[in-house]
Image (cartoon, rainbow, N blue to C red):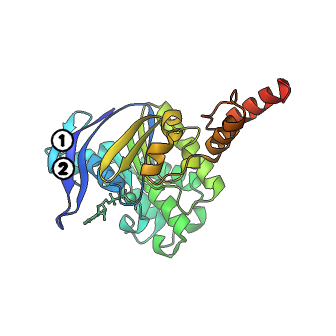
Amino acid sequence: MSISVESISFTYPNATQALENVSLEIKGSELVAIMGENGAGKTTLVKHLNGLLKPNKGKVLINGMDTKTVTVAKLAREVGFVFQNPDHQLFASTVDEEISFALKNFGFSESEINRRVETVINFFELEKYRKLSPFILSGGERKRVALASVLAPDPKILIVDEPTIGQDFRQKEKFLKNLLEMVDEGKIVIVVTHDVEFVVPNFQRIIVMSKGKVIADGGIRDVLTDFKVLKRASLLPPKITELSWNISQKITSFPKDLISVEEARKAILNLIKRGF
Ligand SMILES: Nc1ncnc2c1ncn2[C@@H]1O[C@H](COP(=O)(O)OP(=O)(O)OP(=O)(O)O)[C@@H](O)[C@H]1O
Ligand SMILES: [Mg+2]
């Protein structure tokens, strides 16, 4: 599994330049967050990864296939894409139909379709809504229907644009666990999000965008404790990082770059042991 974005630029027909010279490489078994301010170009970038948009300059290779030459159908089999707004994706008259649509298109047998629909319906707790129109559901439920329909064919690369909006804590935790399992199976999972606390501590890598450019790309500790980068992209550091930085200003032996509650717990117990 690999994604290779090579110096791409993209300008919308109304002359808004949304991407400028963006490059990145992502290989299998990675859980990557893309973060950045509103209008930074995150959605525009990920739409290039499933061929929905083609770059004006540069190229995008998905498992070696150039998105400019490969068919959208072929790409759709490799890359699952969940839209930021589920209403841009949902169209069927019932939740069951919505989820089975892609499975039918991809040529799964009827028994396999039924099995997969059952699995995602159970996972996303949509049993009650199977025969209802997706459009009468609540925002959070609609998002879960969109996620279920994209996950059902088990894509090798998954891109989710803002999955946590409108989801309660329990749904978020469950979904995160599912993403981690996919990564364990060797897949690439890319999540566009403003939700710093969702990213910590499970994501391995964060790509930060600002004004159409990638301004940071690295491990989560390096990126989330770089206050300059965060400020440029209108992101707040994790609360724990803020706390650890504040304590480190008073007690110099205290680490200033903690990102998780577990790390903070250990550091505070250490401090107590040493007699503070
Ligand atoms: N269809 C479009 N036509 C013209 N301009 C667009 C279009 N879609 C997005 N843009 C512009 O391109 C820029 C990047 O938008 P994009 O949706 O990629 O940002 P984003 O980082 O996903 O923001 P958000 O956090 O609000 O979702 C913005 O200036 C936006 O106004
Ligand atoms: Mg967006």
Q: Can you give x and y, in whole percent of width and height, for residue 230 in the image?
A: 47, 47
Q: Amino acid at mark 2?
A: Pro
Residue at (20% x, 53% y) in the render? 10
**Where ligand 2 lies, by image quadrant?**
bottom left
Residue 141 lies in quadrant:
bottom right
Total numbered labels placed on residues in the image: 2
Residue at the disc numbered 2 = 55
Q: As drawn, which residue projects farthest toward the top?
A: 274
Q: Which mark is residue 59?
A: 1
SS at badge 2:
loop
Q: Is residue 86 left or right of residue 181?
A: left
Q: Is residue 130 visible?
A: no
Expressed as whole percent of the image width and height from the top left, the position of residue 227 reads 51, 43
Left or right of 82, for residue 10? left
The percent position of residue 241, horizontal first and vertical second, equals: 62, 41
Quadrant in which the C terminus appears: top right
Q: CA distance from mark 1 to mark 2?
A: 6 Å
Position of residue 261 in the picture relative to residue 108 (left or right): right
Q: x, y (%) of residue 146?
A: 45, 59
Q: Residues within 10 Å of mark 1 (few under 14, many from 20)?
A: some
Q: Are marks 1 and 2 in contact (CB under 8 Å)?
A: yes
User: Residue 154 or 42: which is nearer the viewer?
Assistant: 42
Up/down of 185 relative to 12, above or below: above
Q: Locate residue 207: give its quadrant.
A: top left
Q: Amino acid at mark 1?
A: Lys
**Mark 2 nearby-residue class (10 Å; few <14, some 14–19, many ≥20):** many
Whether residue 177 is situated above or below residue 88 in the rendered picture: above
**Would you place residue 47 above or below residue 93 in this image?**
above
**Residue at the image point whose x is 52% and y is 60% from the top:** 165
What's the residue at 50%, 31% (across, down)?
A: 184
